[in-house]
Image (cartoon, rainbow, N blue to C red):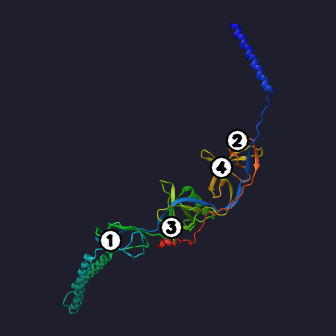
Amino acid sequence: MRSSILVLVSILTIATTACTETDTKTSPTVSVAPAEVDVAAPLKQVLTEWDEFTGRFEAINDVQLRARVTGYLVEKKFKDGQFVKQGDVLFIIDQRPFRYELQRIEAQHQLAQKEWERAQNLRQSKAISQEEVDRRFQELQISKASLEDARLQMRFTEVTSPIDGKVSDSYVDVGNMVEENNTVLTRIVSTNPVHFRFEGSQSELLKYLRLDRAGQRPSSDSAPNPIYIKLLDEDKFYHQGQMHFVDNAVDNSTGTIEATAVVNNDTGLIYPGLFGRARLMGRANYEAVLVPENAINTDQDKKFVYIVNGDDKVQRRYVSVGTLLDNDFIVISSGLSGDERVVVNGIQRIRQTSQPVTPNMTQLEWREIETLVQSNAQPVAVQAAEQQ
């Protein structure tokens, strides 16, 4: 029985092998055509390079208005949130104690004035000594100083705005006691022009310094370079300003350096504390090599493009990328000369390097962009900030 089973298994095995060999010999070989991809030469375009920064608007002057004498607050003379001018009276502190003190010191000063004049007459007749005349003159000077101080204290009972700007609400209600140099009454911020404060990296700082040394772009330390800013709800950079300040040291904790621009705010649209996105001129009028953004691939922290060589095989070319333009082209800082055939469409069909492909040559079209839109306002002079 066992022998019969073994013989049957052997017969089936031989039959199966024979069928397989027959099928293999008779089946035709299927060849796979190379994948089709669109390739194009990178564009070469003369550009002005703009670097982007995120920052915040700040008031050039930000004043916490404090009481300069102690007393009861008796009157508030402004509406919360209104614009005020320098010298406008905003609060009045009870003036009666200061008025009475001023009257008392005025009387003392008048007496000291008469005593000194009398002493001068008596000295002419040698009725008193010169020392007595000098003593009375000293008393006159002391009373004069006391009188000026009393007048100053009286003026301090009217709390005035030290700047032009927008006032906050009142931090102290009428009827409360306010303390000299301690109680904050309200806050006033200047609104036009305003500062735009942002931070740049060490690499950006070094780039600007080297461009300045090469004579390609003046440093913002010495020149009011233009800057364009857009608010969060804007699609273009409508607000023009000028660079005003670059700090003198790189921050040890962040590795960045702080910079400030002065921005015109005639419309009053910009509030201190708002965020903005700025573009600052980098290099001007240089020939850039550009490829579409969708041609850029990522390998961990490296960027690369696929190029097709003379044998129509795919190769990787690692590149350094620069600014992404609003027309979806990206600047290639290094890695491409502009004569390569770069894969711009069909990248998903590429499985590995050295893969043969069928390249379809296309031509990239440059689309003009207008990313910097100046407002109708005139440029802000740097001196405007210094005069505040």
Query: Which is more foreground, mark 4 or mark 1?
Result: 4
The kind of residue tagged 1 is Arg
In the picture as drawn, the residue positioned furthest to the top comes out as 1
Indicate which disc residue 353 carries.
2
In the picture as drawn, the residue positioned furthest to the bottom comes out as 125
Residue 26 in the image, given as x and y percentages of width and height: 81, 27
Residue under numbered circle 1: 68
Q: Does residue 375 lie above or below 354 as drawn?
A: below
* Mark 1 closeness class: few <14, some 14–19, many ≥20 residues within 10 Å: many
Quarter of the image that includes the N terminus: top right
Residue under numbered circle 4: 296
Q: Secondary structure at mark 3?
A: loop
Residue under numbered circle 3: 269
Indicate which disc residue 114 carries.
none
- Distance in Å between CA atoms under marks 4 and 2: 16 Å
Residue 49 as seen in the image, left or right of residue 147 = right
Q: Secondary structure at mark 2?
A: loop
* Mark 4 closeness class: few <14, some 14–19, many ≥20 residues within 10 Å: many
